[in-house]
Amino acid sequence: AEYGNAFSGVFDMRFRKGNLNSREYTFRAGLIGLDFSAEGPFKKGKSSYLVNFRYSTLGILNAFGLYVVRDNVQNNFWDLSFNTYFSSKDGKTKTTFFGVAGYSNEQWYVKDSADWVTSWDYVRNYNITNMGATGVTITRLLDDKSFLKVVVGGTANQIIDLQDDASMDSIRIETTDLINARATANIMYSRKLNKQLRLKAGLIAHAIFYKLDYALWINEAIGNHTFLDNNGVTFQTQHYLQANYRPSEKITLNFGFHSMFYGMNNDFTAGPRFAFKYQATPKTSITAAYGLHNRVLPVGTHLIAVRDSAGSIHQPNLDLKATTAHHAILGFEQLFGESLRFQIEFYYQHLFNVPVNADTNAIFETSTYYYYNMRDHYGTTRMVNDGEGRNFGADITLEKFFGKNFFVLFSGSLFSAMYKTSLSPTWRRSRMDSRWVTSFMATYEIPIKKGKGGIFQVGVKSFLNGGLRYTPALEAESLAAGFFIEDTDRAFEGEFGTYFRLDTRLAYRKSAKRFSYTIAIDLQNATNQQNIQVFQYDRQTGRLDPTYHAGILPVLSFQMDFK
């Protein structure tokens, strides 16, 4: 119940403590950049630090004629993370100061006009993403049965995306500059009432700051339209209560309640959570869970300015409510021997109050528009909470734990992801409805006993998935209008095709008393498979042209760990 404002997944990052007794360092250099980390005690046994910095550039690979994106694209990126840990003299108070930050810069350059084939050749693109998060956690043991945890921090991110079209005298076709920031306070209290029952309650408060600018060149007749030019502040609060109850050694029950209030439109949502686990034997367990989950829409979706068919501009999405989902899961897990685990989970999710188009009388508005089919941005249309989604399937995992010098992990999913709108009430396949996905990973270690010794590692990782989907274009109409017009009668009937990728790794690791080193060669997409990433509409030709994920990428690296 402590996790809210999500209905597809939760990313909960927790830093480990640095080494409390000795200093350790890692240095890594490779064809895609440098990596350095350090950890150790401030005061042995009581406080420590942990810090990591990575700088990467694809310029080295480009110099060898290897391009992750295209030959007219350059990338640079770096990230920094740190965590410091302090324990009080009585050991009852733990304090951490943590942070993470990242920067990415991607630039698309215009090719010589003689080499223009698609818009990927003559559209200049300048893209920057920045993010940062930092905070302080204080955990206080109140007595032998309860503790209080307080987290205060802030996050910020920025996306800049500027596009010019050299084929139209470098006219600006898109301007994006989106800044979102949050100041957050999180307080949680946990108490063990007896051997069977533990309670947890908490409050999370966010002050949300935003500065959003988004303009798009539509066509000759309309020119540029500014969808976002807003800055301000709003707030959100989340509240939860959860109980963990074990009536017997074999049965565990979790039940709770989560609620949320969003200041942008005074929207209050709430829902129950329930989970059950039956440990039939030490190696066999059965689980079941249900939750009613809610997720508010981003600030930018509420503030979008839309031009209607009469030419008037207004903000029609201010009162959109949160999307809600029923989510149920049934799972089974079995251990075989000491090293083999099998798990299968069946799930069903029904979404409602999903934003869809209100009508089809304005630019970009289509009867089959469904908010969660978008790849990026906040939308460009007038919406109502009348859409529905239906996702169900099974997830399977087979894992052989590391032992006898190797491990194996296989996972697969069979699923259906459908949606419908009020203007098109027939269930349709969504963008993500690839129907099946699989992954396989394995590593085998070969100890080398002769000579100086060491370990030789051979690893593979592969993905084999059904293709994502897209909506074909009305080519003649799009070419006449100068922008992409979907063939809504065939919404998401197009398919990228099966996705396959194989990564391989060869490495040699040698350890000594105070240091170790690893030399590795990773071949990403070792078979040089041409997997479609996205279709992009070309204004000049009126076609949807594919761009592909990276081809074969060899990455040579050297890593040293020392004390």
Image: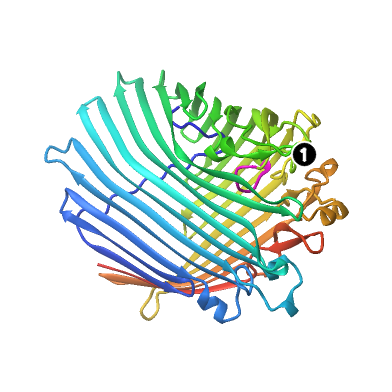
Q: Amino acid at mark 1?
A: Thr
Residue 282, x across and y down, in percent: 46, 33
Q: What residue sits 75% from the left and 49% below the top?
A: 470
Q: What residue sits 60% from the left and 64% below the top?
A: 125
Magenta segment boundaries in residue numbering: 373-379
> Image height check: is 406 above or below 267?
below
On screen, residue 461 versus residue 472, left or right, reads left
Which residue is at the front of the view, 260 or 524? 260
Query: Which quadrant holds residue 118?
Result: bottom right
Q: Magenta part mainly helix, strand or loop?
A: loop
On screen, residue 35 versus residue 275, left or right, reads left
Q: What residue sits 37% from the left and 81% below the top?
A: 451
- Kindly identify which residue carries mark 1: 366
Q: Quadrant of the N terminus?
A: top left
Q: Secondary structure at mark 1?
A: loop
Q: Residues within 10 Å of mark 1 (few under 14, many from 20)?
A: many
Query: Which quadrant holds residue 293?
Result: top right
Q: What residue sits 78% from the left and 56% below the top?
A: 482
On screen, residue 92 versus residue 519, left or right, reads left
On screen, residue 192 versus residue 314, left or right, reads left
Q: Quadrant of the C terminus?
A: bottom left
> Image height check: is 200 above or below 123?
above
Report the coloring of the rendering. rainbow
Which residue is at the front of the view, 450 or 145? 145
Which residue is at the front of the view, 298 or 241? 298
Residue 326, x across and y down, in percent: 61, 26
